[in-house]
Image: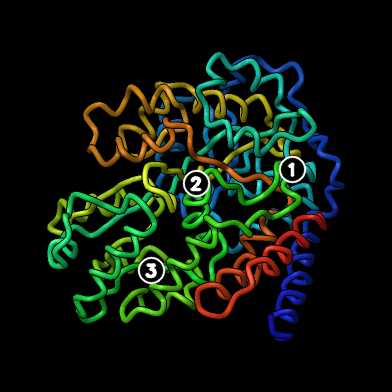
């Protein structure tokens, strides 16, 4: 790599390290702070208390559905605050230092390991282990908030990555509109067919080149589908220097070098408008968050383009995977209403609640049994989305330094993708830059 890229990686490491500072005052003991769940009833308490909940703006619709259903059926009332995604880290950091965190804190599942290790949450191991249906719940969201055997979090809202394609554009390009890509090679082939239409503003695919979070959501599943990994088991070392990752990056580089291969703005996309080009009918095929597909299906009913949905394939045909993302939730160290907060968590884990607030709304439940039983009359595409969870091939990566290494602006992962797709990347060197941040935590 040229010296400029070395300097850029160094600066990114410094910036990433700076992002660790806001929660330093929590102590990092992972002991759950001052609140305690000792002695609370198995189902918590429903006595008319107001409890507060913070969550991120990308999952606002789902969160509002959950809170509305709980408030209608309980004496307790949840006061929901939606935090802009980019403001969440600073908001939590400041509140943690002033002991003003909400009763329930929901956050990006890949950030949960760091928060849990810093003592943000109350230890609810006994309550989680006491759930009759614990084995049916999204285990990645529980594992993300587990530190030294103590459990702090449960799933709040599940978001998974799937492949979507524009059936109208596929028909125009001479492709079978009912067949999405079953390998990365087919993904490139189909995207290039759409690109070759040379329609104004239309491109084969799209990539959020400046959004580390969107990039892991899009690209990691293909690596997992091939049986490869992105990190070692304890999240201290990157393993991105493998043939599958190279194959995926080479595929996007080929599209970047193809006229209309990647949509305009892909290199600069920060994630703020990541899903908009496809939703506007301008993209042929791309990985996509399932929490945004409901809007696509609704638009289709109102005369919009037809949407195809399939699991994300690997470089080899036959295997698929997904990024098991979304938000996990826990009771904060500052909660004065632990029993009431647990009542909300307990309620949401039940199959009836999961059906009401997720399945009946066309969203993805976090309860596997609900996924298997409550969607029989649902749109077949929603059943396809559910299948990527039920088949057990999805993963939730875990590392206390995940945000700094992957999600943060200017992260070494983001630079790795930029170098590989739009530059002359050195995968081995860029992989080491990710490891340097992971191992520094």
Residue 71 in view (yes/no): no
**Mark linked to residue 234:** 1
18 relative to 113 in the view: left or right: right
Q: Tell which tag, 2 or 1, sits nearer the viewer.
A: 2
Label whose residue precedes the other's in the sequence (2 or 3): 3
Label whose residue precedes the other's in the sequence (1 or 3): 3
Residue position for label 2: 226
Indicate the secondary structure of the residue bearing disc 2: loop
Q: Position of residue 212 (x, y in %)?
A: 57, 63
Q: Position of residue 383 (x, y in %)?
A: 30, 35
Indicate the secondary structure of the residue bearing disc 1: loop
| Residue for point 59% across, 36% down | 141
197 and 105: which is toward the camera: 197
Label whose residue precedes the other's in the sequence (2 or 1): 2
233 and 202: which is toward the camera: 233
User: Badge 1, how many Cα within 10 Å: few under 14, some, many 20+?
Assistant: few
Query: Distance between the Cα atoms at labels 2 and 3?
Result: 22 Å
Indicate the secondary structure of the residue bearing disc 3: loop
Residue position for label 3: 206
Q: How many marks?
A: 3
Query: Distance between the Cα atoms at labels 1 and 3?
Result: 32 Å
Query: Distance between the Cα atoms at labels 2 and 1?
Result: 20 Å
| Residue for point 31% across, 38% down | 384
Q: Are marks 2 and 1 in contact (CB under 8 Å)?
A: no
43 relative to 91 in the view: left or right: left
34 and 240: which is toward the camera: 240
């Amino acid at each position: 790599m040229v010296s400029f890229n070395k300097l850029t990686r160094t600066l990114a490491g410094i910036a990433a390290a700076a992002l660790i500072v806001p929660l330093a005052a929590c102590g990092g003991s992972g002991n759950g702070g001052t609140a305690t769940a000792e002695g609370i009833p198995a189902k918590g308490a429903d006595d008319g208390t107001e409890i507060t909940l913070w969550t991120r703006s990308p999952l606002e619709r789902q969160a509002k559905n959950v809170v509305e259903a709980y408030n209608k059926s309980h004496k307790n009332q949840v006061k929901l605050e939606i935090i802009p995604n980019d403001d969440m880290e600073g908001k939590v950091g400041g509140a943690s230092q002033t002991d003003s965190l909400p009763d329930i804190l929901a956050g990006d599942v890949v950030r949960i390991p760091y928060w849990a290790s810093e003592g943000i949450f109350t230890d609810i191991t006994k309550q989680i282990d006491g759930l009759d249906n614990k084995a049916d719940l999204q285990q990645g969201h529980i594992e993300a908030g587990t530190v030294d055997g103590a459990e702090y979090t449960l799933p709040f809202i599940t978001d998974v990555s799937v492949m979507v394609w524009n059936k109208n554009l596929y028909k125009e390009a001479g492709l079978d509109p009912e067949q999405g890509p079953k390998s990365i090679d087919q993904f490139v082939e189909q995207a290039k067919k759409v690109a070759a239409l040379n329609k104004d503003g239309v491109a084969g695919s799209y990539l959020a080149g400046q959004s580390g979070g969107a990039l892991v959501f899009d690209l990691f599943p293909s690596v997992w589908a091939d049986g490869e990994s992105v990190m070692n088991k304890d999240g201290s070392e990157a393993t991105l220097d493998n043939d599958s990752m190279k194959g995926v990056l080479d595929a996007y580089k080929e599209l970047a070098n193809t006229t209309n291969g990647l949509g305009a703005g892909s290199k600069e996309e920060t994630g703020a408008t990541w899903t908009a080009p496809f939703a506007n009918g301008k993209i042929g095929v791309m990985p996509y968050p399932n929490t945004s597909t409901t809007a696509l299906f609704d638009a289709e009913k109102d005369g919009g383009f037809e949407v195809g949905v399939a699991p994300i394939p690997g470089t080899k045909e036959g295997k698929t995977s997904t990024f098991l993302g979304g938000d996990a939730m826990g009771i904060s160290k500052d909660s004065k209403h632990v029993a009431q907060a647990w009542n909300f968590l307990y309620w949401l884990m039940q199959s009836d609640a999961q059906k009401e607030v997720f399945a009946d709304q066309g969203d993805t439940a976090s309860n596997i049994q609900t996924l298997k039983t409550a969607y029989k009359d649902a749109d077949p595409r929603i059943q396809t989305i559910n299948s990527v969870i039920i088949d057990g091939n999805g993963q939730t990566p875990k590392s206390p330094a995940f945000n700094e290494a992957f999600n943060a602006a200017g992260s070494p992962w983001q630079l790795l993708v930029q170098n590989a797709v739009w530059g002359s990347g050195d995968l081995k060197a860029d992989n080491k830059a990710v490891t340097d941040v992971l191992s520094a935590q």
